Amino acid sequence: DAGITQSPRHKVTETGTPVTLRCHQTENHRYMYWYRQDPGHGLRLIHYSYGVKDTDKGEVSDGYSVSRSKTEDFLLTLESATSSQTSVYFCAISESVTSEAFFGQGTRLTVV
Amino acid sequence: AQRVTQPEKLLSVFKGAPVELKCNYSYSGSPELFWYVQYSRQRLQLLLRHISRESIKGFTADLNKGETSFHLKKPFAQEEDSAMYYCALRDQGAQKLVFGQGTRLTINP
């Protein structure tokens, strides 16, 4: 497996609380992505990064923010969690725009 | 904007039968297309990509630019092929990797 770790693996949180998910890589890959996986919707891109401090929005970015202060870490923050953000979140990394993407194990987030 | 459509959420076939998972895309540039697979309790992983034109685990996929399709095919399904399959498109201009809705393939014995 590529050196990519997501934490936490599972989290239950209350509506309105802030939540931060972490993606850590040891591959020194330039590109990092955050997706959410929902039944019937597949994988939808939330945000992605193409370098330190270089990030951009995906197709479902509302309610989420990201930060990448180091190559190895890509943080996804839900400023005020809502029940619609209950999902499985996947991080992925890619060395270049033409190379394979490697995925983390996923984080199951439940907002109650 | 780029878009990937997998029209079948669920597909069920018998062992030994041919399999075809459909993928259609919309993209104004020159697309780079992939198939990813997620087996039960495993990470999502790359199955194949169109530029390599190789066969992985008996699966092949041909890019048809005229029909904007990248269907995944296997002539004889095996039980271990049961998994979730995602078609994906890389938007090189924006450096994004966009996925379809996924198709859950079940191979019946």
Image (tube, rainbow, N blue to C red):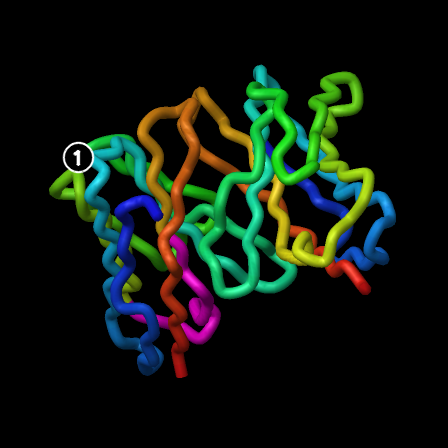
- Would you identify the image quadrant in which residue A108 lies? bottom left
Q: Please determine whether, in this image, residue B95 is positioned above or below residue B72.
A: above
Q: Is residue A82 magenta?
A: yes
Relative side of B48 to A9, left or right: right
Q: Position of residue B79 (x, y in %)?
A: 72, 58
| Residue that sits furthest to the left in the current view | A69
Residue B7 in the image: x percent, y percent?
76, 47
Please check the rendered image and state whether residue B48 is part of the magenta-colored stretch, yes or no. Answer: no
Q: Taking A42 as reference, is A83 left or right?
A: left
Question: What residue do we see at 33% from left, 56% from top?
Answer: A64
- Classify the position of the N terminus of chain B by image quarter: top right
Tell me if B39 is positioned left or right of A81 in this view: right
Q: Residue at x 62, y 55 (%)?
A: B84
Q: Which residues are magenta?
A: A80-90
Q: Residue at 85% of width from left, 57% of height from top?
A: B14
The residue wearing badge 1 is A52
